[in-house]
Amino acid sequence: MSENNRVIVASGLQKQVIAPAANNASEILSILTEINLQVAAGVSVAITGASGSGKSTLLGLLAGLDVPTAGSLQLFGQELTQLSEDQRAALRLGKVGFVFQSFHLLEHLTAVENVLLPLELAQVKGDLKQRALTALDQVGLAARAQQFVTKLSGGEQQRVALARAFVTQPELLFADEPTGNLDRHTGQEVAALLFRLQHDYQTTLILVTHDESLAAQCNHWYRLADGRLHRQESV
Amino acid sequence: MASYWQQWVRRWRLSEMRLLFLALWISALAVAAVGFFTDRVESAMERQASQVLGGDLVLSSSRPLPDEYRQLATRLGAKMAEVVSFRSMLSVGETAQLVQVKAVSTNYPLIGELQAANNLTAAGVKAQLPASGELGAEPRLFHALPAPVGATVKLGRSEFILSSVVTKDPAQGVNFFQLAPQVMMPLADLPATGLLSPASRAEFSLLFTGSERVIRELKASLQAKLAPTERVRTLQEGAQNVQQALQRAGRFLGLAALLSVVLAGAAIVLTAASLVRHETAAVAVLKAFGLARRRILVDYLGNLWFLALVAGILGALVGFFLQTLLAHWLVQVVAIELPPASWTSAWVSIVTALVMVTGFALPALLRLLDTSPMQILQGSLQAPTALVGVFMLSILPAIFLLMWIQARELSLTLWVFLGLLVAVVLFWWLAKLSLNGMARLSTRQGWQGLALLRHGRRSLLLVVVFAMGLFTLLLLTALRTDLIGRWQASVPADAPNYFLINIQATDQANLENFLKQQNIQANLYPMIRGRLVEINGQPVTADDYPKPEAKRMLEREFNLSSFAVFPESNTLLAGQWFDANTQGFSIEKGIGETLGFNLGDRLSFDIAGQRFTETITSVREVRWDSMQPNFFVVAAPGSLLDKPYTLITSLHLAPNQPELIPTMIRQFPSITAIDTSAVLGQVRSLVEQATLAVQGVFAFTLVTGLLVLWSALQAQKPERQREIAVLKSLGANSRSLRRRIWLEFLWLGGLAGGLAGLLTLLAANLLGFYLFDLGLSLNPWLVILGALAGAGLVATAAWLNLRSLLQVVPMVLLKT
């Protein structure tokens, strides 16, 4: 892995939170103790672990949604721990996509309007609507573009979320349990779509899941336990 | 009970439950504050009007009143004063003057205070009744007689000392045509004068005050015993000029109060919908565990009623406190004493909270109970959608009931209710049209700048609520400005304060000249006395009419006039005013209604033994509070001038012209000058009170509107928080998020305000025309002002409410 094609470099990351305890007291809870991770451009990385092991916390830190308590973290070569929230957001704009377990589509918008959102935020020029429709077409939902997302099924909503994530052709995509809220069959379909798009656009993928079959499809697989990452050799 | 309480506490943790409480509390607070305040101002106004009448109830007769009535009043606990009034000659040495004698009992006046001065130039101060052997007299008696204060005068067989100049007799009434100056004497001195014999023409009156219940009972008992010569007057039948102002103010206050209830209702609907969304899962789980629908309903309903009860009581308490502050502040501004508030408003506010929670939340609850427990297993929870039918059956009657409680007038309630329904439907339809149109446009190439406005679509309900709120406020502002302007214009600072009557036709030119020299503007109107004898050729007598009012009109002579210029204080309702060639009568609306004639009917008057017949060619509305000479019947210009007539006029005299009237009377001895400044003062003080009430209520409604706006925003907070987190995760910075909030709400507020302005324009004209007797006016500024005020108000409130959401950490998206 050469220096300049690393998208993420994390070393010695720690995350502690203050949790309320009995008798109005509070205690410091250590979620991540020592995280070291380097991710090269274009690869897919899976992170698995038991419930409460800190998978989502780690994903949030890597995406710059939150800041670590200690350690260093570089995203696209920039040290995240030195940046303000707005500067971290600017770093993500147009370059980072997200797929969430609960989809997090905006309910008052139609499918195509949801997909338009990141393009408009990044102030991309050109025929945005056409781009959004193309993205929806890629996930097989062109026909439902004008539907409000509340009218769509869970699988369809997650496909809209995939279209929203890939419409800016991001360099990096974070997926948080993307199949967690879907039935097995639909989950498999959505996963297949995710990997196809990741492959087509050469997007770096960080995937948090507890579905081992899904993790096994990634280039690299880490298990999170006791606040540390353990490399899992693919089966 | 303990478990019930625990459940209540657990449910209290729901933000919707707290929001519902807030909305209920705000409505109860608004109702209580407006209620307490209007109650106080209304009773201040009634007291003022009672003062003009002389009491809450007045019984008068042309014969002495039997003791039975006095005993009845004493038994019921009413306070009582007695007045005997008649005309007589008063003499000083060789000079005699016709006076109106008013003999009063020791506890006169029952309401207000008597004011008197020691000489003509001093200002009046609070004074006692004239002592035995003394007389108090109106200033004009001193102008008419060569007698100073302290002179001895003769009245009947007794001698009196003219001890004071009476500057204010609170119960003087509004009789401009009382020719003779009034003197006041103790009733006990009356028999000794020997002036009253069984054949004398006099008016004997008993004035009563007491609680509303006492007056009601007294009136009923008296009416059962009345002899034909006796009649009872209460406030409602009292002086006409006072009543018009009182009616308008009362209507406005009722309207303002009920609109504030509707505003608060909007908040409850929003919150109840949000509560149902939240509780769907809980109900599905409870049902899956085996709880019966009935049990769940009783459980939720009990919780909500308790919530409403607490909100109602707290609202009443805080409302009382707020009202005290407001009244305290306003009283300092206009210097008027307000009587204490009654507790009725506290009950009304508690009932309001209970009705609101039942009417607005019950249908949502019933729908909630239909949640299938299967939804839990299927994993997809769908909040039940409100049905149109549910709205019809529950929310609409609840709103109607609340309005009725507030307005206490069925027809007003009905009209405003229908108006509001139309407003909601119109707002909904127009807002939907423009929000969807804008969203569709925003996806077209070149129109992407509008993309932000797409988010406004979720806020259809918000726009309707904002628009209703702004509509209420604009409507109140428009009507308030109109009303207050009209009232103040009706008693301007230079309103006439003197009536000159009995001006001889031969003096007309000289008097006009005299007034011109003094720079005084006055129109002289001829006044002809005539008795109505026929309508459409059929003879009429008092016996043909059952109504006492109609009987009285036919028993006395009318004052007719004839002139060419349509008076400013009148409004033409039907027909045509006279031009150079027309003949006919122009009648006042009320007299036509009372006596049953209208446009096209022929009236015959007996004027000094001659018959004068004409057709009614126009109907006018007369503002009796204008202080101008007004006439029930006016004939075409010049048509009556061959009959015997005198002239009448009104004029304004500045306080620095005290010599003018005596000089004028010396030059034109036949003229009688009547000082109406006391009456004018009473009307002006009424207007001040009405203005005070309207401003107070306006302030409350403004606050309610803002609070409702706040709770409406609160209901959208969770969704907006998630949205901001999503946008942040996609790379939006705080500057662009701030911009999004401002732009979205500037647009929403502007849209709501523009729509509200448009509807206000329509409604203010309709309401002003039908309810408040105001003219039509089209003011495009209402729409512009509405849009600007809406955008500013809504965007600022939204920013203050939502800015804390910008702190949301996008990590929350990963935890759900």
Image (tube, helix red, strand yellow):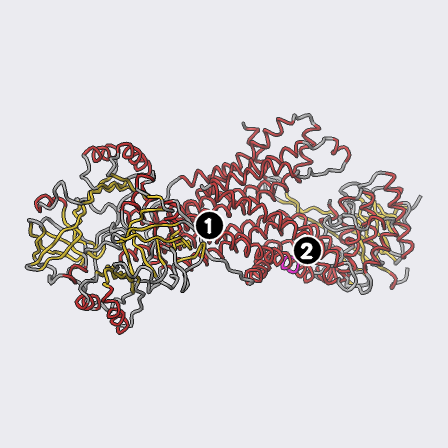
Sequence order check, earlier mark of 1 and 2: 2
Of A100 and B384, which appears nearest the observer? B384
Mark 1, other Cα within 10 Å: few <14 / some 14–19 / many ≥20: some
Question: Tag 1: residue type?
Answer: Leu
Q: Tell me: residue B544, above or below residue B785.
A: above
Q: Which mark is residue A124?
A: none
Q: List x then y, in percent, for residue A10.
A: 80, 56
Question: Tag 2: residue type?
Answer: Ser
Foreground label between 1 and 2: 1
Chain to which the residue tagged by mark 1 belongs = B
Tell me where the magenta segment starts and ends, as one range: B742-746
* Badge 2 element: helix
Q: Is residue B774 magenta?
A: no
Q: Residue furthest bottom?
A: B517
Q: List x then y, in percent, for residue B309.
A: 50, 36
Q: List x then y, in percent, for residue B683.
A: 33, 55
**CB of mark 1 within 8 Å of CB of mark 2?**
no
* Badge 1 element: loop
Q: Which mark is residue B771?
A: 1
Of A43 and A72, which appears nearest the observer? A43
Q: Residue at x 28, y 47 (%)?
A: B53
Chain to which the residue tagged by mark 2 belongs = B
Q: Are marks 1 and 2 on the same chain?
A: yes
**In this view of the protein, can residue B22 be seen by the observer?**
no
